[in-house]
Image (spheres, coloured by chain):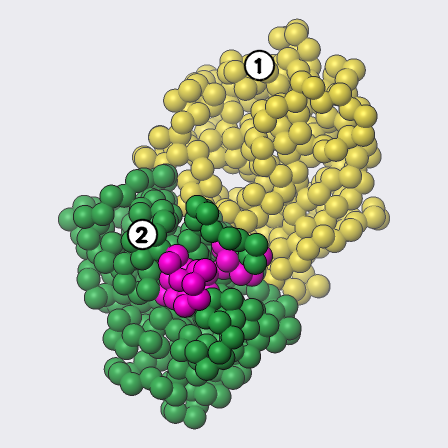
Chain colours: A green, B yellow
Amino acid sequence: MLQLKQISSNKSFGGSQKVFSHFSKVLSCDMNFAIFLPSEDVNQKYPVLYYLSGLTCNELNCVQKCGFQKYAAENGIIVVCPDTSPRNIEGLDTSAFSWDFGYGAGFYVDATIDLYKKNFRMYSYVTTELIEMINSNFPAIPGKQSVTGHSMGGHGALICALKNPGLYQSVSAFAPISNPVNCPWGHKAFKGFLGPDESTWKAYDATELVSKYKGPPLELFIDQGSEDQFLKENQLLPNNLVEAAKKVQMPLIYKLRDGYDHSYFFMSTFISEHFAYHAKFLK
Amino acid sequence: MLQLKQISSNKSFGGSQKVFSHFSKVLSCDMNFAIFLPSEDVNQKYPVLYYLSGLTCNELNCVQKCGFQKYAAENGIIVVCPDTSPRNIEGLDTSAFSWDFGYGAGFYVDATIDLYKKNFRMYSYVTTELIEMINSNFPAIPGKQSVTGHSMGGHGALICALKNPGLYQSVSAFAPISNPVNCPWGHKAFKGFLGPDESTWKAYDATELVSKYKGPPLELFIDQGSEDQFLKENQLLPNNLVEAAKKVQMPLIYKLRDGYDHSYFFMSTFISEHFAYHAKFLK
């Protein structure tokens, strides 16, 4: 039982939306996370949907802006929203940090370069410590978990599922960075966390990982707004992922939503479909 | 046709969530407001629900946190969210301002004391200029409008409806400041905007106005969380309003929601019921 400190608790749709902090051994720092519990029935256990947030976000953005609580309550699913990076590391040289690299932008990788490798290990945090901590402290059904995310967090959801066959029952992503080795955001982050050898970057790239996937059948569900500014700027590259999946006959649902952009207004409009989707695999 | 400047536009639930600024003659300053248009059909006209926000809020809080867009789209209702006060008045002595008085806290009154009477006229702005501006610039059905709000904005919704019989088809309020002449927030604001003569304050107090109401039948719909911190601190005093309505046989629906607090998590849980309620009167 790890020590958890409750930061806030608000009743919402018959359940409760809470925020906690805990000390992460993997990241060597305190981390906040948000958790929605779908009812106040203490004898009930629930499957869990992990939601990974995008650049500049913390554990609260999705909780406040996405409106998922209604669907989590209706479907009886716990939702866990971790922060997007370690924070406030004492003594760390942050001179290279910016809005798209560093704090608020951990990119769900395990850093290998000396400067960041002690703390920037979001990949291991999300796929191991976070799940264990949730399972030991909340009414979660172990093994019944799925993952989703938005933008950088959509990339995170895809690579966490593709690199860990069977760990998640299902995966979906809103406007994910689908091929980071080929976009400016990915270049900057991967070079920063993994060093200049581009061959090491592929281990965290969904489009690359699709062809290497071996495990139980996995389907990818991608949601994308047609008027997404970052789609137009070639930061997201979903078509590369679609093509890669087609090549190896991995099933992929690609929904292009006419007129929608990259914002939470896009996500809140379609989040109900993602809960319906994950509920099929989690129930 | 007043000059409107579009600040942002995001597709949401098949409609669009927009923010504009315009110059308000009533307030003698530029004002932002948010507007949700329930579809992209330019030939269709819609009734309007005005939403008045609470202390410290601007036009965006409800737009981002309440999740009303789904219900506005489903019911075919335009939603307008004005800011809660004039802002950035050049040369104004703001030394008396604080989080619960002044900018972000206009209390939906027309100030009478010299310092504020030129700009702090949120009552007239909301009940006249804002409605005229919406009707002239957007596909609104004139005369088909209702009003709701949260906390200070719940007070605003109630007094706007009670002081203008027939102007709104229906009124509801989340956790409204129901009897401001008897609570600390109301005392501070009314003294600040209206001066020390307490008899002048009653013209903006829902509990006082109920007994003076003369007009078409009006029902009040009040939603309140039982664990609301400000309910416990006697800032809201809904029971005084319930009693006053009972005395004059004004119909009042009072829903006390077990365990809910003052936050947007409370409001987002029950906003669907308010749309269903207003739709009955607006359609």
Q: Quadrant of residue A217?
A: bottom left
At a point 32% along the width and 35% down the height, the residue shown is B259
Residue A142 horizontal/vertical position (percent)? 19, 62
Q: Disc 1 on helix, strand or loop? A: helix
At a point 44% along the width and 33% down the height, the residue shown is B262
> How dense is the environment of label 2, judged by Cα within 10 Å: few (below 14), some, or many (20 and up)?
some
Give the CA separation, mark 2 to mark 1. 48 Å
Q: How many marks?
A: 2
Residue lying farthest to the bottom in this orientation: A247
> Disc number at residue A42?
none
Q: Is residue A100 magenta?
A: yes
- Nearest the viewer among B259 and A84 is A84
> Disc number at residue B187?
1
At a point 57% along the width and 75% down the height, the residue shown is A183
The reply to whether residue A209 is in sight is: yes
Chain letter belonging to callout 2: A
Q: Disc 2 on helix, strand or loop? A: strand
- Nearest the viewer among A279 and A176 is A176
> Which SS type dominates the magenta stretch?
loop
Q: Is residue A258 magenta?
A: no
Region of the chain picked out in magenta, as a range: A98-123
Question: Which label lies toward us, 2 or 1?
Answer: 2
At a point 39% along the width and 34% down the height, the residue shown is B261
Q: Disc 1 residue type? A: His
